[in-house]
Image: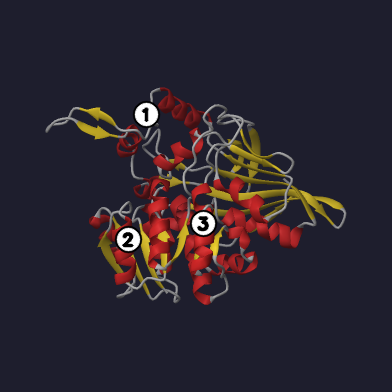
Amino acid sequence: MRVLLVGAGGVGTAVTRIAARRDFLTHMVVADYDPARAEAAVAAVEDGGDRFSARRLDASDGEAVQRVLREERCDVLLNATDPRFVMPLFDAALAAGAHYVDMAMSLSAPHPTDPYGQCGVKLGDEQFARSEAWEHAGRLALVGMGVEPGLSDVFARYAADELFDEIEEIGVRDGANLTVEGHDFAPSFSIWTTIEECLNPPVVYEKDRGWFTTAPFSEPEVFDFPDGIGPVECVNVEHEEVLLIPRWVGARRVTFKYGLGDDFIAKLKTLHELGLDSTAKVTVPGPDGPVAVSPRDVVAACLPDPATLGARMKGKTCAGTWVKGTKDGAAREVYLYHVVDNEWSMREYGSQAVVWQTAVNPVIALELIASGTWKGTGVLGPEALPPRPFLDLLTAYESPWGMREGR
């Protein structure tokens, strides 16, 4: 399989390090707007041989993306950029006749008059609107194939297939006990994406009501995470699983809650109150005259790059899916989860836990597509495909998943 990886940040670099250990990959072109980042990602690969190369590429330039896909004879485009570049990359892959995989879906837009009650444009709506074109082309667009969304969706399908007869609720729950030495505020994932998902109206699904929204950080609950992480307060956050799971898995209710913590929530609220979460450009003075910049991009530039935090991070991160329902007439609850210890991921791959946990899942998906184990056409979420081969490969990648009976 020949892959065009667009985005050589923390997740993209972790993708190269993971993929280098697998035989399915014939060649991976690592592309980024900053050629130095692409070259660094390739240089970081141990024993990569000539299977990796670097190129400069602007993810917003669809024609340039198509040209690289064709020149490099790539079978798949793997999108490791932030969500604002989803649609140009998604469209370019289709135009070039390649398959497509991403880890975050096309952006949402709040309802114009009732943002905390009704959905406006939902995450992924733009992509699903073009599913027929992908079907006609005989190509697969596998969307939301990171850890959350991604592995969490695989867990949901596995629970429906093998653990439950009827499902009352599926709740994705994410928590960690990670700390970063020397920083009071250092998000372990892209702050651009974190602001987007945390400050948008969260979406909830109920079978009798469909999709609807609530206020940010609503419905707090304390969830006890495994492997020593312990109790963490989690709140509603906008996330793709709630838009994906109900399309393929029957459940009366679907939610996503994230363990943010009071201090993190307070800082996000302050950014919003100051307008620093905005993506609309403002004009500021510069040495050569006025410069137009996005406040959110400025915030991102002022914070440390998550990819550089691993050496100062301690603790574990947990992604998982809690499922409540019945099996053989008896009530049942399970929590399917995946924990990564930062010490392990740094020692084994040189990547911090959060970006490694995100990156391993699209690599597994690519291997399943390359082998023909996962196949399909159109725009599909992870829960549209058989879960057991994925979970077996996750264990083969030396990062096993777990299951806990009860909440």
Residue 98 at x, y percent in the picture: 42, 67
Depth check: give the residue in front, 305 or 255. 255
In the rendered image, the quadrant that contains the N terminus is bottom left
Q: Which one is in front in this view, the residue at disc 2 or the one at disc 1?
A: 2
Where 107 sits versus 46, above or below?
A: above
Residue shown at 41%/27% (left/top)?
271
Which residue bears the numbered disc 3? 143
Residue at 49% x, 49% y is 126
In the displayed orientation, state which residue is furthest to the left.
288
Q: How far is disc 2 from disc 1 in space, using C-alphas?
A: 31 Å
Q: Residues within 10 Å of mark 2 (few under 14, many from 20)?
A: many
Q: Which of 351 and 16 is in front in this view?
A: 16
Disc 3 residue type (three-letter): Val
Element type at marker 3?
loop
Q: What residue type is labelled 1?
A: Leu
Q: What residue lies at 54% left-to-right and 60% top-to-bottom? A: 132
Locate the C terminus by quadrant: top right
Indicate which disc, 2 or 3, sits on the residue closer to the N terminus.
Answer: 2
Report which residue position mark 1 lands on: 276
Mark 2 sits on what residue? Answer: 65
